[in-house]
Amino acid sequence: MKQLSEIFQKQIVQRIVRNLLDIFILQIIKNEPTWGYRIKKNIEQEYGIKLRHGALYPLLNALENSGYLTSRKEKHGGRIRKIYKITPKGTQYLSAYYKFLSEQIEDSLK
C-alpha cells in the first residue's frame, strides 16, 4: 500500500512541475542566478522530469521577454554561458503565486 502512495506522489509532483514549469524555473533562478543546462539538470534530479532543450529555452526566452528574468553572458570554465537572474517583476510574480497557493490551502482547511 505504501509503495502505491509513493507512486501517486511521484506522479502528482511530476504533473505539478510540468504544469507550473515557469514557477519552478523562477524559483530555481531566484535561489541562485544560473544557466539553462544547470536548470535542466536540477529539474531532472529534483523531480524526475526529462526536460528537453526545445521546451526549456523557449520558456526562458518568454520569461525574459515578459520581464521576469534578465540574462548576461559570462565566461565559466572556458565556456561562455548565458546566466539568468530574476527581476523584481519575477519576484513579485512568484510572491503572487505563493500567496494565491497559501490562500487556497487555507480555504481548503476550513
Image (cartoon, rainbow, N blue to C red):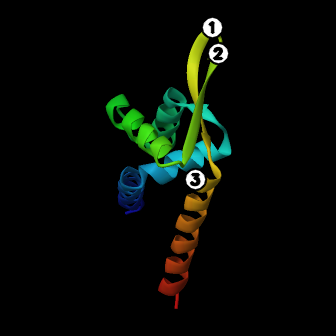
What's the residue at 58%, 72% (across, down)?
99
Amino acid on which disc 2 is placed? Lys
Question: Which quadrant would residue 38 be assigned to in this image?
Answer: top right
**Left/right of residue 83 with respect to residue 60 in the rendered view:** right
Name the residue that disc number 3 marks.
90
Residue 48: give x, y in percent of width and height.
42, 41
Callout 2–callout 1 Cβ contact below 8 Å:
yes
Label 1 sits on a secondary structure element that is: loop
The disc, 1 or 3, on the residue closer to the chain's N-terminal end is: 1
The label shown at residue 75 is 2
- CA gap, disc 2 and disc 1: 6 Å
Label 3 sits on a secondary structure element that is: helix
Label 2 sits on a secondary structure element that is: strand
**Left/right of residue 107 with respect to residue 92 in the rendered view:** left
Residue at the far bottom: name it.
110
Amino acid on which disc 1 is placed? Gly
The disc, 3 or 2, on the residue closer to the chain's N-terminal end is: 2
Q: Is residue 50 visible?
A: no
Residue 17: give x, y in percent of width and height.
42, 52
Image quarter hosting the N terminus: bottom left
Name the residue that disc number 1 marks.
78
Amino acid on which disc 3 is placed? Gly
Residue nearest the observer in this picture, 48 or 20: 20
Residue 36: give x, y in percent of width and height.
50, 30
